[in-house]
Amino acid sequence: MNEAFIPTAIIISWVILTLVVGVLAGIKKKFDLAGYLVSGRTLGLIFIYVLMAGEIYSAYAFLGTGGWAYSYGMPIMYALGYGALAYAFGYFYARYVWKAGKAFNCVTQADYFLARYNSKVLAVLVALIGIVFNIPYLQLQLQGLGYIVHVGSLGKISVNLGIIIGLLIMMIYVFTSGLRGISWTNLLQALLMFLVAWVVLFAIPFKHFGGVGGLFETLSQVKPQHLVLHPPMGIAWYVSTLILCGLGFFMYPQMYPSIYSAKDLKTLKRNYVLLPLYSIFMVPVILAGLSVAALGIQLTNPDEAVLKAVEVSYPSWVLGIVGAGGFAAAASTASAIILTLAGLLSKNLYAIVKP
């Protein structure tokens, strides 16, 4: 049997399962605008939790986090810290967004600013900024998705084909099910991401160094700079990056429909209390990147670190599981961006130009 058959089959099976779950979530449902864009403001704690977490822990969580750990070491810890700061801020800020959404029937970020400041010009400006600057972010997710699927399938699925397949799958279930479909697929994706992180990636330091302690002991000998904050990424950089990323978190327009979708304020507040725990998903990813550095493996592209760690630690079919996990991470973010862009374009731009 061809070595690439099993990992490729795993990835394709997961993609099909994602499509089926996403479409079934909205089948036989009749959506009004709020039902489509914010799931009728009915989501409970579990769905709102995986929805918000999926929007931020993207392809970067698999590729960029491990790559940074491989290249720089401890400075990557900012990725664990800024989320906690953002969610602490969100605990106090999001309640105002949710209340405005319920009172004024808001479904997009621009709607919130229209409700707060009663300015159509401001709403259009917010919508334009959200669309223009989120398109590169969407492109980044798709590129990451294609790359992960390409490597996970041992090259059988090209990067461009992976992008096309992933985009088509997401467009189908977003079109048929809206935010409800995204919340259901995000629940599925979250389960796989944690399986990949805590079963596959967390075991890597134990395979090569006897444990996490052995990994750090080896790093102290071969790459001691990886264990400290070092120039130009010292303490000032670390603190300023935490503040910038944490407080800038709610500039993402896809954060707002998720807030509106909470069934009540109590659910929303509980969600922000629990969301920092989701960051532990990235701990095994960081350890995998550090393991590659400690093993002395030279990479021309640091983003390959996590996939290389899996490649040197497991049989080839495990790459298929990791490839599916990477697809899950990218799709959970990209699908929310697609729906958000559609809402901003139709509700806040087209509807104003052609009321």
Image (cartoon, rainbow, N blue to C red):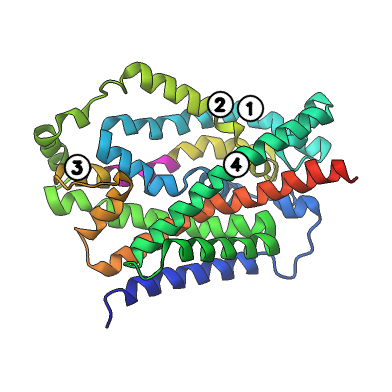
Residue 242, above or below 282: above
Horizontally, is 28 left or right of 248 in the view? right
Which residue position is annotated with label 3?
293
Q: Quadrant of residue 26?
A: bottom right
The CA span between labels 3 and 4 is 33 Å
Which one is in front in this view, the residue at disc 3 or the one at disc 4?
4
Q: Which x, y percent locates residue 238?
A: 37, 22
Q: Which residue is more in the foreground, 176 or 352?
A: 352
User: Amino acid type of disc 1?
Assistant: Tyr
Q: State which region is magenta.
A: 278-286
User: Amino acid type of disc 2?
Assistant: Phe
Q: Are marks 1 and 2 in contact (CB under 8 Å)?
A: yes
Q: Which x, y percent locates residue 319?
A: 31, 63
Q: Are marks 3 and 1 in contact (CB under 8 Å)?
A: no
Rendered-image quadrant of the C terminus = top right
Which one is in front in this view, the residue at disc 3 or the one at disc 1?
3
Which of pointers 3 and 4 lies earlier in the amino acid sequence? 4
Question: For numbered disc 4, what is the local secondary structure?
Answer: helix
Q: Residue at x 41, y 45 (%)?
A: 61
The CA span between labels 3 and 1 is 40 Å
Which residue position is annotated with label 1?
93
The CA span between labels 3 and 2 is 35 Å
The CA span between labels 2 and 4 is 22 Å
Which one is in front in this view, the residue at disc 1 or the one at disc 4?
4
Callout 3: 10 Å neighbours few (<14), some, many (20+)? many
Residue reaching furthest to the right? 355
Residue reaching furthest to the left? 221
The CA span between labels 1 and 4 is 22 Å
Which of pointers 2 and 4 lies earlier in the amino acid sequence? 2
Q: Which x, y percent locates residue 143?
A: 46, 53
Rendered-image quadrant of the N terminus = bottom left
